[in-house]
Image (cartoon, helix red, strand yellow):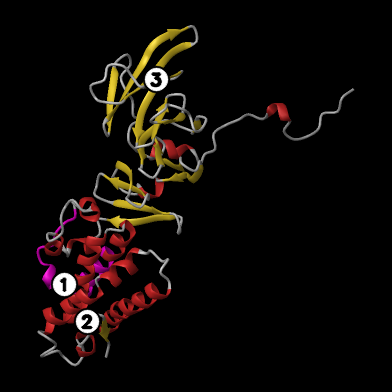
Amino acid sequence: MSIQLPGIHINQLMCCEIPGDEPIVKFINVLDPLKMPAGISVTKECNAMKIQITNNCHKTSRGSLSKIEVFDNQNDKEPKWETYLGSCIRCIAANRRKIVACCEDLTINCYDLKSGSRPLPPLLIEDLVSSLSISQEGHCLVLTKTGLIHMWHLESAKNILSRVSVRSLLSGKGTISSCNLSSSNQPIISLSDGRAYAYSMELQTWLQLSNPLDPVSGVGGDLRKKVSPMLPLASIQKSMPVHRNADMLPPGVLLSFLESQITATSVLQSTTEYKHWLLATVNHLLEKGPECRLRVILDDLMRAHRSKSSRPEENCLVVEMKFQDRHKFCIIVSFDNSASCTGCSTKNARYCIWEPIHRRGLRYY
């Protein structure tokens, strides 16, 4: 005679979805999964070469085959190499060395562009791909339809990011409009409402680059017009509002905007924009203050020069830009605001008399 123990038995347990996971699919409204047409060849140019994708090109007893063909030239009729996959190809991306193909069976397939050989077995992710990017350095970025980011360095076969969620970015009504890699191989997410974010590997969190919903962002309209719209940050901030009565606001509001622009351009490593916003900040501080903030910027110029000479291996954008343009920058600050320092206020005098010495250095008083 068997004894029935109290409590729940193993055969009574059932698998069910975790309540906390369910809203991820319903709440995140990311891009629709990419998909190529079936039975139709789709071509993609890659430098002088041509890549051609044909889904459902052959039928087998186990399903349909899809084909990747690579041609040396755009007008070639015969491919240099071809390969087949047992699943429908939804999207591809390529750089000068690699081709990446994402399939309906949730695999990511990588091929050498010149030979068609596989450097890696298929990579498996948890859902269909909504966005695919690959940099010339071999960084591959994938955004799934449920809002998770994966990133690998294909050349070294190493993982960089795994299952990083974009859920925290979708707090408003905006939806994801693009997911790309910056020139420094950082994931950049742009939303339909104009917001933009970069993911920091060091801080392991998202950094805000643009937010038109923030009232502070509208005070720099005239200054933004002086920057080419093709530059990294300017292209992201196209939908920034402009306050008509920005001059009526306290000076600290504009300073807050300028400092946010400096940090954003530093993240994007946009040298031209960094110089523009740094000079705009110095001009603002010379006119409105506070002096302590100006002291930090100018002291950083000298500190950057010293660290550059003592640590030549350092290759930070900020240090490099300040060192190379240090003389020119200080001359501009001096002459634009005080005409060779004549008429400088006592408050700003110590910062206006940086002067070149035989074009080799600066004297700091």
Measure the alpha-carbon separation of dots 1 and 3. 63 Å
Circles 2 and 1 in contact, beta carbons < 8 Å? no
- Circle 2 packing at 10 Å, graded few (<14), some (14-19), many (20+), is some
Residue 343 location (% of width, % of height): 10, 90
For residue 186, side relative to residue 21 (left or right): left
Residue 347 in which image quadrant: bottom left
Mark 2 or mark 1: name the one nearer the start of the chain: 1
Label for residue 289?
2
Please report whichever mark, 1 or 3, sits nearer to the chain's N-terminal start. Answer: 3
Real-space CA distance between mark 3 and mark 2, rounded to the nearest whole angstrom: 65 Å
Residue at the spot of label 1 = 249
Q: The residue under label 3 is which amino acid type?
A: Glu
Percent across and percent down for residue 355 are: 21, 85
Query: Residue 14: percent from the left, percent from the top?
Result: 63, 29
Residue 224 is covered by the magenta coloring: no
Residue under pointer 3: 82
Above or below, 30 relative to 335: above
Circle 3 SS class: strand
**Mark sitting earlier along the chain (3/2):** 3
